[in-house]
Amino acid sequence: MLTYKNGKYRSAGEKCGVLSEKAAYELGLPAGIAVGSGVIDAYAGWVGTVGAKVKLEGSTLSSEYASNDWHQAFTRLAAVAGTSTCHIAMSPKPVFVKGVWGPYRDVLIPDYWMAEGGQSATGELLKHVLETHPAFQQVLSIAESYNMNIYDYLNEHLKDMQTKQNAPTISYLGRHFFFYGDLFGNRSPVADPRMTGAVIGLSSDKSLDGLALYYYATMEFIALQTHQIIVTMNKSGHQIKSLFMSGSQCQNVVLMSLMASACDMPVLIPQYVHAAVVHGAAMLGAKAASADRDGKTEPLWDIMDRMSKPGRAITPTKDPHEKELLGVKYKVFLEQCESQQEYRKDVDHVVGKWGKANEEPESIVKPKAEQGEKGKEGGGLNTMLPGSI
């Protein structure tokens, strides 16, 4: 427990008390169980993920410490990926990053700082792209006939397309298709809810192959934007060298491979893909239960190191041509991100002048409905030009 001039508070897992008789009865648990300070789900995902036992190469580790030393956590970005994705990183000193929340001190480990980036929609983006394509029902029916989910089926279909077109890699299929997917706004690193999507290479193709290409491009966007977030964080002072994933997207082999190659760093998948958050919460419970009479608990990293299970690593592509292709695609991705903001700025400048030119003199009395006042016939609606306030 930490004491400051404005009060006392506990870091993650510090013992707060014990389970009361009433709560124990309602939960079906014994009374007196230690209760620890909790965290939100994404942070529990960090706890349950970054301690995964995996063999990493020297370049992805901090050379100053042993491979399982807690200082290695500073090099690991936890990505909790489901409907959206949260990116959680720890640093020994405060690192301020544009478009990334924090830094927050003492959240998980006393005296250390956490930062949180994110993508507004990743799993939801994939779902949206598939469901709005004309071939969706056809693909869904075929996938169900093979007793497969639609993502696994599309991954297999991409491999078939690669074979039929004699393409060197799946990424080669999408070489001339550029999808920018901020359909739900941008959380990191632009931090602008006005951001939207853009496509270069759009055609009239309504086929299954067309849907598969759009699906691949969406995965590529997710991977490239993850790279953008990591680059932005590292430029500001973080030292991220590996990506520790958890959540439903970990099951998507094509996406995880893209993530590793686009970010040019290993992606680590924990043993408990779906339960990393719950596993992390269990570790916090173990910390609370370790409290002695003075309330002192076992260090969280020691618990993470002891309770974490072996994971598996996905390494970046070794194909120099694919590396170069993804490098070019990232360049276009950045241009799509930046040009959209410039286009909006230019248009808003023009529209802003347009609105001022159409302002009515104050001497003109508007009808009550236009003034926004409630009347017998008026609905209280105001007519506004785009860009006006």
Image (cartoon, grey):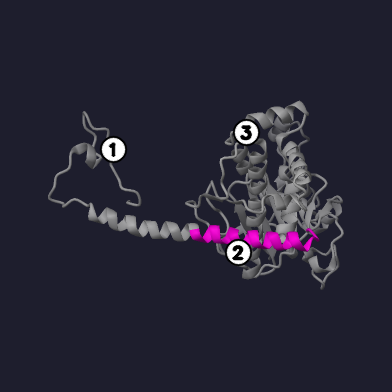
In the image, the segment drawn in magenta is 317-339
Q: Can residue 14 be seen in the rendering of this structure? A: no
Q: Vertical placement of 317 versus 278: above or below? A: below
Alpha carbon of mark 1 to alpha carbon of mark 2: how far?
51 Å
Front-lying residue, 34 or 304? 304
Horizontal arrangement in the rendering, residue 211 relative to residue 348 (left or right): right
**Residue placed under numbered mark 2 in the picture:** 4
Q: Position of residue 63 (x, y in %)?
A: 82, 72
Mark toward the start of the polypeptide (1 vs 2): 2
Callout 2: helix, strand or loop?
A: strand
Q: Secondary structure at mark 1?
A: loop
Q: State how many labels appear.
A: 3
- C-alpha span from label 2 to label 3: 59 Å
Q: Residues within 10 Å of mark 3 (few under 14, many from 20)?
A: some
Which label belongs to residue 135? 3
* Sooner in the amino-acid sequence: mark 2 or mark 3: 2
Q: Residues within 10 Å of mark 1 (few under 14, many from 20)?
A: few
Tell me if 34 is positioned left or right of 365 in this view: right
